């Protein structure tokens, strides 16, 4: 049975800290434009099965997580005061991570950003609760005085916004060097889980952001660690739990 990303044994023990707090977004009318700006593509015809695969052509808040020289998960910049906060799935957390924003065609246009801190919920650390499958990462690039967010833009963290959204979903399959992008409509799956039917999101896309109106309202994760087929993905619902984690990470 395939899953979006197999949770490493070290993930449950991870918990360090981060910085941040706030807002930023862009607009776009095509998949490429929206990907570059971190904004959703909206269309009256958008449905749960509509999907567009596009290469990253510009700077973006979405990128690939790397460890041991290979990318294995997806993450995105979330607005924070320090501009150094990245969101992914908790089951993606492992040692020696780095983040490549706007990674495409084997190129990291803004270089690699080292993960220096991780914030995960206590319920994930103790029992890998699928409703708490999210994590905030602090990143930095030695010698760079600019914040990551000032270079990529960011999405606002959206909490308690309900279960039905027209979203843009982005992820990095671990067998390719460019992201896949899908527009789809989310539904409620379980009490604290969302579901979206977006074809072409296999292993490596875990942590990919679910973006609507410049806000990230989910990440691929949760039930079945994000889904056991590449055509349906899940996310934990973003409520007070992630809001509290963000507040503690933001300091």
Image (cartoon, grey):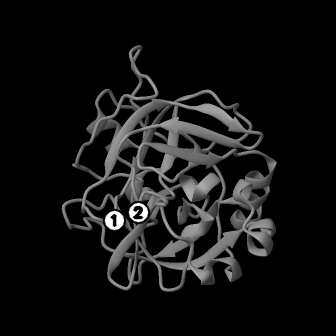
**What's the CA distance linking mark 2 and mark 1?**
5 Å
Q: Residue at x 48, y 40 (%)?
A: 25
- Residue 150 appears in view: yes
Image height of 125 relative to 201, above or below:
below
Is residue 37 depicted above or below 114 in this figure?
Answer: above
In the rendered structure, the answer to whether residue 157 lies left or right of residue 190 reads: left
Q: Is residue 155 above or below residue 45?
A: below
Q: Is residue 15 visible?
A: no
Residue located farthest toward the front when viewing the structure as drawn:
1
SS at circle 1? loop
- Residue at image point 75% right, 74% down: 125
Q: Which mark is residue 111?
A: none
Where's residue 29, x and y in %? 32, 26
From the top left corner, tell me how far across and down residue 65 is, in percent: 42, 69
Q: Give the quarter of the figure containing the C terminus.
A: bottom right
Secondary element under disc 2, as helix, strand or loop, is loop
Q: Which residue is mark 1?
A: 174
Tag 2 residue? 204
């Amino acid at each position: 049975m395939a899953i979006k990303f197999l949770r490493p044994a070290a993930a449950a023990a991870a918990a360090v800290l981060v910085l941040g707090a706030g807002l930023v977004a862009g607009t776009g009318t095509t998949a490429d434009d929206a990907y570059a700006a971190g904004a959703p593509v909206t269309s009256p015809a958008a449905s749960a099965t509509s999907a567009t695969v596009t290469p990253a052509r510009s700077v973006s808040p979405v990128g690939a997580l790397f460890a041991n020289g290979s990318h294995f998960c997806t993450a995105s910049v979330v607005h924070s005061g320090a501009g150094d906060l990245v969101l992914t799935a908790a089951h993606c957390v492992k040692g020696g991570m780095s983040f490549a924003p706007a990674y495409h065609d084997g190129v990291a246009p803004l270089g690699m950003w080292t993960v220096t801190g991780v914030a995960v919920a206590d319920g994930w650390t103790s029992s890998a609760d699928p409703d708490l499958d999210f994590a905030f990462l602090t990143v930095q690039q030695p010698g760079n005085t600019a914040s990551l967010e000032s270079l990529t833009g960011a999405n606002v963290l959206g909490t308690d916004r309900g279960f039905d959204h027209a979203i843009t979903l982005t992820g990095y399959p671990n067998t390719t060097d460019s992201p896949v992008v899908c527009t789809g409509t989310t539904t409620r799956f379980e009490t604290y889980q969302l579901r979206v039917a977006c074809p072409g999101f296999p292993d490596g896309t875990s942590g990919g952001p679910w973006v609507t109106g410049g806000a990230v309202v989910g990440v691929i994760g949760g039930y079945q660690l994000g889904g056991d087929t590449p055509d349906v993905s899940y996310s934990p619902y973003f409520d007070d739990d992630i809001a509290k984690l963000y507040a503690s990470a933001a300091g």
